[in-house]
Amino acid sequence: MDNYETAGYGGGEIGFGEQAAVLVVDFQLGFTDPSYPAGKSEHIHSAVLHTNNLLELAREKNIPVANCNVAWSGITDMGYWKVTSLYDGSFFKGHKSTEIDPRVLNEDYDFIFTKSAPSIFFQTPLLTYLVKQRVDTVVITGCTTSGCVRASVVDAFSYGFRVIVPQECCGDQEEQAHKDSLRDVGRRYADVLPTETVMNHFQTISVNL
């Protein structure tokens, strides 16, 4: 046992509730297309493919999907980011790189919106959508694990949702940062599960039309 286990961290499981939703954080071309500075991570590319499989099943089972990108009107409405690639204009509204990767997007099904801060919840319409859908469990995917995904996990927990993270459906610029972040949120706020385990749970859900 390490010091965290001795102190009681990571004990037990949260589990799924009655109604899940899948949240997709920032799988936009700026992070998934290697022609952009932040889009060169093979770890993120792999996460997109795993998330695509998860989303296909979620939509088949009529599970709500919320899909967001991050974008700003210009420097004046941005926070004080230390990520220089965010300031070259490619993350400004209307730029191609702000478009959600088509591999994880279904415009006829998904609830789609733009955020301006790390968390998918911060000053967005997501909470209202989840309450209306009677969601009690959020399955969080996206990038980057150590940044916007982690912030979204913490906010989801703070709003009282059960939080599930399918580990292969999140990506980061470096895999070690991904592993460190998932280990940490798994000690505190979320069940970090193999994607296959999450999909097996989805398979048990009866479709409500």
Image (cartoon, rainbow, N blue to C red):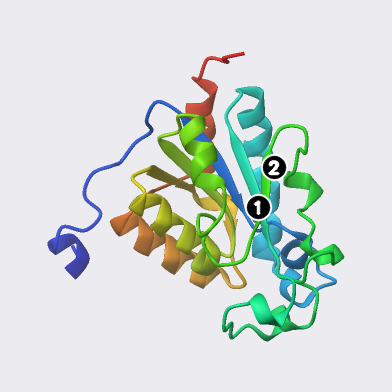
The residue lying at 60 percent from left, 23 percent from top is 61
Q: Secondary structure at mark 1?
A: strand
Amino acid identity at mark 1: Cys
- Asked if 154 appears above or below 200 in the picture, the reply is below
| Element carrying mark 2 | helix
At which x and y percent is residue 19? 45, 28
Q: Which residue corresponds to the image point at 57% horizontal and 84% vertical from the top-left? A: 80
Judge left or right: residue 124 versus residue 67.
left
Find residue 53 and report its horizontal and vertical position in percent: 67, 38
Q: Position of residue 142 (x, y in %)?
A: 60, 55
> Disc 2 designates what residue?
52
- Left of 124 or right of it: where is 6? left
Cα distance between the residues tagged 2 and 1: 15 Å
The numbered mark, 2 or 1, whose residue comes first in the sequence reads: 2
Q: Amino acid at mark 2?
A: Asn
Figure quadrant of the N terminus? bottom left
Q: Residue furthest front?
A: 76
